[in-house]
Amino acid sequence: MSATNKVLLVTGGSRGIGAAICRQASEAGYRVAVNYVSNRAAADALVAELETGGGEAIAVKGDVGNEADVLAMFEVVDKTFGRLDAFVNNAGIVDAKARVDEMSGARVERMMRVNVVGSFLCAREAVKRMSTRHGGKGGAIVNLSSVAAIHGAAGEYVDYAASKGAIDTMTIGLAREVATEGVRVNAVSPGITDTEIHASGGQPDRVARMRDVLPMKRPGSADEVASAVLYLLSDAASYITGAILNVSGGR
């Protein structure tokens, strides 16, 4: 899975699954652009870690839900590295546990703006740089979905689940759209994974609480999800596009 000198941009790359992807990518030889929205310290610390390990990395600020920020983020990558070979649509949000009849319009709009619109905007910019139709040399995109798209997250995060259902559909449609242009598009769909996202949704105990309903009786790790992402980015997955790979321990 060597990717010497290839350039990878990971949105939401400073923590959790995103950071695990950045670490594994750097080890594989990618030059890595670590996107973050507000936690500059975490992004800088990760970049320093990757550089200490012999990698090349930069931190790039940007809110994927803001089109101007998306454009600026990709321009930084252009100016720094001069190419883009791989892209991971990892940035996303979850909100507090709530029923649909308790959700405000502002909450739902924010969820869709970041998780869906942001992913579309970033995928658009990645395709513009990779697609042979636009003069690119090809590349690979991996979107982060969730098995919540299948289960629906009733009583907790139906808006989040719906946003990930949109990601699944986008993955399939975009993959077919650019299949003859040298760009592969796939998704990884994690199940219960031990990251900070549960605490950000107001349920820091969710992993422990869900453990017994998981077929493998344990959560996944960020590294296990990252390994699947790196596989789909690699040449080892050269005939895979439009796939949604569940990394959910059988859930």
Image (cartoon, rainbow, N blue to C red):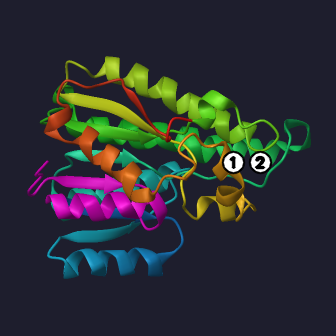
Mark 2 crowd level (few <14, some 14–19, many ≥20, 10 Å Cα): some
Q: Which class describes the residues within 10 Å of circle 1: few (<14), some (14-19), or many (20+)?
A: some
In which quadrant will I find the C terminus?
A: top right
Q: Which mark is residue 36?
A: none
Relative to 25, is 44 on the left or the right? right
The image quarter containing residue 222 is bottom left
Residue type, label 2: Arg
Which residue type carries mark 1? Answer: Arg
Which residue position holds label 1?
A: 110
Tell me, yes or no, whether the two marked residues, 1 and 2, touch with CB atoms within 8 Å.
yes
Residue shown at 17% from the left, 71% from the top: 55
Q: Which residue is mark 2?
A: 107
Percent x, y of residue 241: 29, 25
Q: Secondary structure at mark 2?
A: helix
Question: Which segment did they paint magenta?
Answer: 1-29
Q: Is residue 23 magenta?
A: yes
Residue that lies at the very extreme toward the right in this rendered image = 101
Q: Nearer the viewer, residue 238 or 251?
A: 251
